[in-house]
Image (tube, helix red, strand yellow):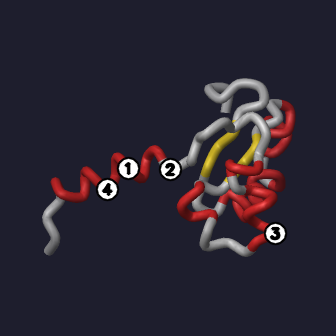
Amino acid sequence: MAVYGQNGSCAYDIGCAFSKTLSTSSLGPHADALALRMMVGAFHGHAHNCKCQLDWHPMYITGTGHTEGEGCEHIFSSLNELARST
């Protein structure tokens, strides 16, 4: 978490639910001290209900700019072509 530094954010498909897990884990106090903000990536956020989107979608979180939180998904989708299906 130190990589993110103070006031960082982290997007995860289920960031809304994961934030509860994080807060009750042994890493919770460290995440709180760093003010780490979980969010739901823009693409996956549209599968969540309206309240969840307002609370967790990067478009509604101050300081996230135009991030979509799906950068790894772009890389994974292009790498899928390298893996053969069985």
Q: CA separation, marks 4 and 2? A: 11 Å
Indicate the quadrant where residue 24 lies. Answer: bottom right
Q: Are marks 2 and 1 in contact (CB under 8 Å)?
A: yes
Q: Residue at x 67, y 33 (%)?
A: 1
User: What residue is disc 2 on?
Assistant: 70
What label sits on residue 74 in the rendered view?
1
Q: Compare marks 3 and 1 and give the one earlier in the sequence.
A: 3
Q: Residue at x 26, y 51 (%)?
A: 78
Q: Are marks 4 and 3 in contact (CB under 8 Å)?
A: no
Q: Amino acid at mark 1?
A: His
SS at mark 1 in the image: helix
SS at mark 4 in the image: helix
Q: Residue 2 versus residue 55: which sits nearer the camera?
A: 55
Q: Compare marks 4 and 2 and give the one earlier in the sequence.
A: 2
User: What residue is disc 3 on?
Assistant: 51
Q: Residue at x 61, y 40 (%)?
A: 66
- For disc 2, the neighbor class at 10 Å (few under 14, some 14 to 19, many from 20) is some
User: What residue is disc 4 on?
Assistant: 77
Q: Residue 17 versus residue 78: which sits nearer the camera?
A: 78
| On-image quarter of the C terminus | bottom left
Q: CA separation, marks 2 and 1? A: 7 Å
- For disc 1, the neighbor class at 10 Å (few under 14, some 14 to 19, many from 20) is few
Q: Compare marks 3 and 2 and give the one earlier in the sequence.
A: 3
Indicate the quadrant where residue 16 lies. Answer: bottom right
Q: Amino acid at mark 3?
A: Lys
Asked whether, in this view, residue 42 is left or right of residue 60, the answer is: left
Q: Are marks 3 and 1 in contact (CB under 8 Å)?
A: no
Task: List x then y, in percent, for residue 14.
Answer: 64, 63
Asked whether, in this view, residue 6 is left or right of residue 32, the answer is: left
Q: Residue at x 58, y 60 (%)?
A: 13
Nearest to viewer (mark 4 / mark 3):
3
Q: Are marks 1 and 4 in contact (CB under 8 Å)?
A: yes
